[in-house]
Image (cartoon, rainbow, N blue to C red):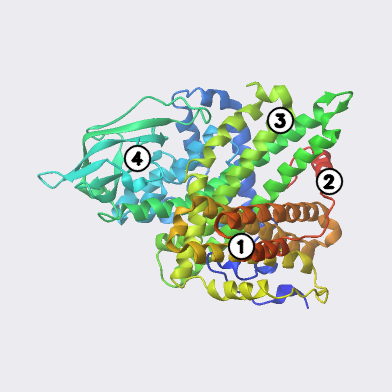
């Protein structure tokens, strides 16, 4: 009997850490339906015909160009993919919306502008606005007639968003809120028509407001000159007795943090999607350069060192994609479940995103760092030419760097990953105690070696189970030893987060390969098998290193020795010729002259 007949059991957020997932319940990119494939192709075509031919003009901030491109995207329906039809959108599922973010992700500064518009520029009003606000603003934002922006960051409050100083006070006649303060690093700020802005009513009630360009007392600064994403409009916003109609209060007084933080969950996943789209294009550019660039009378793509780089870039992209769409489907399924239970669409998606906030934080880190790796190695493959503005890889390199900073820095997201897991465990949302206790007993027992399990991928599945044991052992040991002080040991928490990120990515890759082999047969999946096996082989070393760093920081004596032995056991993998696997991966890339999937 095929394992695909197993009953589906939906996992809660973070539960993958203590339970096994079925590959046959896992969504993979090969599962896209025909409509989704068409949407993806439409996005690629839009970039190739409308955006990339004018990319230099975009980078020079040519007046009106970025807004006109955003509006063209709106005319194709690409701005309102997930907006309900009653507000002028297409009402598509979360997978399709994620695909749009990926598909437009290779458009450099344009990608930043359109992502800001469809995400933080539109979603706060869509999810938290009242009916009148949604009717007034969402149709024009979905069509691109109006452009959206978002004002949260201030000169002295970045990651500490609640430390904002901008204030709001009700006017004497009760008709307006009077805002005073400033915001910085505002994407689309130079041309947007609608802004979601956060301020503290009476100096302490953190709240959100909808502002329109032209409101009295609302001005903007000049365009910022940035290291990358030069074509993205970035300005400061100033409020000097700015009059905002009381009906433009967004959500409830003092509940602005709910808007800010819930929108970030979705934004982190979609940033991963956009970074993923950019990484695919950067790798294709690099492959094509390596095939045509000759040194010593042969294409540099024939050199082992270059093959290694091309393969490693492809591995990170493929694994990131596996984790991205696995999570996107979880969110989509949870949203469907909540809608069926009677929740309105906005509460359903926000609730689904909150459920998988841990995974969204992981994706933000993994996706942005995968893109950074790809463009960095892309420049290296280009050699001196990669440092020239004449080659587009240099633009990809500069534009990539911002992704590790916004939507919460990667350091913040690492800390959040562990913090959310621990808090859910304390609240009973995630049962870590049982698995952690069983691992403690396992540490003092002699391991049993058995080859009885001859089911497909039994060895790889055991490897993933052991990675999870390593995480629970280290995290449990740190909490037990440090207690409440663990939150001050950021280095240890980031070590644990890195273990979790590697494990989630590795499991996602394995699940995708299992499903593909079941569908196509092993012989047809040689490329994917090489990627998965190489990633698992390397992940074992990365997890071992992060685990040792954490253990050496909080444990000592016999406890340390026992846990180090456990870590060694949990990260042990069979010998594997990763050089030959990478050469086979690179051969496929070179033969296709592009990233093939």
Q: Residue at x 36, y 53 (%)?
A: 259
Point out residue 358 in the picture as x, y percentages from the top left corner.
Answer: 52, 58
The nearer-to-camera label among 4 and 3 is 3
Q: Which residue is mark 1?
A: 557
Give residue 40's mark. Answer: none
Mark found first going from the N terminus, 2 or 3: 3
Q: CA distance from mark 4 to mark 3?
A: 41 Å
Image vertical order of residue 137 relative to residue 283, above or below: below
Q: Residue at x 43, y 50 (%)?
A: 88
Mark found first going from the N terminus, 1 or 2: 1
Q: Are marks 1 and 3 in contact (CB under 8 Å)?
A: no
Mark found first going from the N terminus, 1 or 3: 3
Query: In the shown orientation, is residue 112 left or right of residue 167?
Result: right
Residue, far left? 172
Q: Secondary structure at mark 2?
A: helix
Q: Residues within 10 Å of mark 3 (few under 14, many from 20)?
A: some
Give residue 380's mark. Answer: 3
- Nearest the viewer among 59 and 568 is 568
Q: CA distance from mark 2 to mark 4?
A: 53 Å
Query: In the shown orientation, is residue 158 left or right of residue 566?
Result: left
User: How many numbered marks have been drawn onto this rendered protein structure?
Assistant: 4
Point out residue 129 in the picture as x, y percentages from the top left corner.
Answer: 33, 53
- Nearest the viewer among 560 and 475 is 560
Q: Residue at x 45, y 53 (%)?
A: 488
Query: In the shown orientation, is residue 168 left or right of residue 367?
Result: left
Q: Are marks 1 and 4 in contact (CB under 8 Å)?
A: no
Q: CA distance from mark 1 to mark 4?
A: 60 Å
Q: Are marks 4 and 3 in contact (CB under 8 Å)?
A: no
């Amino acid at each position: 009997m095929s394992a695909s007949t197993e009953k589906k059991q939906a996992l809660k957020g973070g539960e993958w850490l203590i339970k096994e997932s079925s590959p046959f319940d896992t969504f993979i990119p090969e599962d896209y339906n025909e409509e989704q494939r068409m949407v993806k192709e439409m996005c690629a075509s839009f970039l190739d015909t409308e955006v990339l031919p004018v990319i230099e003009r975009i980078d020079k901030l040519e007046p009106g160009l970025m807004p006109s491109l955003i509006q063209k995207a709106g005319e194709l329906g690409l701005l309102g993919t997930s907006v309900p039809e009653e507000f002028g959108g297409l009402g598509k599922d979360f997978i399709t919306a994620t695909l749009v973010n990926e598909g437009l992700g290779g458009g450099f500064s344009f990608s930043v502008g359109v992502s800001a518009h469809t995400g933080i520029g539109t979603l706060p009003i869509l999810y938290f606005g009242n009916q009148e606000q949604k009717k007034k603003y969402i149709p024009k934002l979905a069509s691109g007639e109006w452009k959206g922006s978002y004002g949260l960051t201030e000169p002295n409050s970045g990651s500490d968003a609640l430390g904002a100083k901008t204030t709001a006070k009700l006017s004497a006649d009760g008709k307006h809120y009077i805002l005073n303060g400033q915001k910085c690093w505002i994407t689309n700020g130079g041309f947007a028509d609608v802004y979601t802005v956060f301020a503290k009513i009476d100096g302490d009630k953190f709240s959100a407001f909808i502002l329109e360009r032209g409101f009295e007392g609302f001005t903007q600064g000049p365009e910022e000159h940035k290291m990358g994403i030069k074509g993205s409009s970035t300005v400061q916003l100033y409020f000097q007795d700015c009059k905002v109609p009381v009906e433009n209060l967004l959500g409830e007084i003092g509940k602005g943090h709910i808007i800010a933080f819930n929108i970030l969950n979705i934004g982190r996943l979609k940033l991963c999607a956009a970074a993923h789209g950019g990484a695919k294009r950067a790798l294709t550019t690099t492959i094509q350069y390596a095939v045509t660039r000759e040194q010593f009378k042969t294409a540099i793509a024939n050199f082992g060192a270059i093959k290694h780089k091309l393969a490693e870039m492809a591995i990170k992209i493929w694994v990131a994609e596996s984790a991205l769409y696995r999570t996107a489907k979880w969110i989509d399924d949870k949203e469907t479940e909540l809608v069926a239970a009677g929740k309105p669409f906005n509460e359903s998606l926000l609730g689904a995103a909150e459920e998988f906030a841990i995974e969204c934080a992981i994706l933000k880190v993994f996706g942005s760092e995968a893109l950074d790796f790809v463009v960095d190695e892309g420049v290296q493959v280009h050699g001196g030419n990669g440092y020239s503005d004449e080659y587009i890889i240099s633009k990809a390199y500069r534009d990539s760097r911002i992704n590790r900073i916004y939507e919460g820095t990667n350091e913040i997201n690492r800390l959040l990953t562990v913090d959310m897991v621990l808090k859910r465990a304390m609240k009973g949302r995630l049962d870590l105690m049982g698995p952690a206790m069983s691992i403690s007993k396992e540490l003092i027992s002699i391991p049993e070696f058995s080859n009885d399990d001859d089911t497909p991928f039994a060895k790889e599945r055991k490897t993933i189970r052991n990675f999870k044991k390593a995480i629970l052992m280290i995290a449990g040991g740190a909490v037990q030893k440090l207690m409440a002080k663990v939150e001050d040991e950021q280095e240890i928490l980031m070590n644990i987060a890195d273990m979790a990120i590697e494990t989630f990515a590795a499991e996602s890759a394995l699940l995708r390969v299992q499903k593909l082999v079941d569908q196509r047969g092993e012989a047809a999946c040689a490329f994917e098998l090489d990627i998965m096996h190489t990633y698992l082989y390397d992940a074992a070393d990365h997890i071992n290193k992060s685990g040792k760093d954490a253990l050496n920081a909080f444990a000592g004596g016999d406890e340390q020795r026992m846990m180090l032995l456990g870590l060694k056991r949990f990260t042990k993998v069979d010998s594997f010729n990763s050089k030959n696997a990478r050469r086979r991966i690179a051969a496929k890339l070179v033969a296709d002259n592009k990233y093939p999937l």
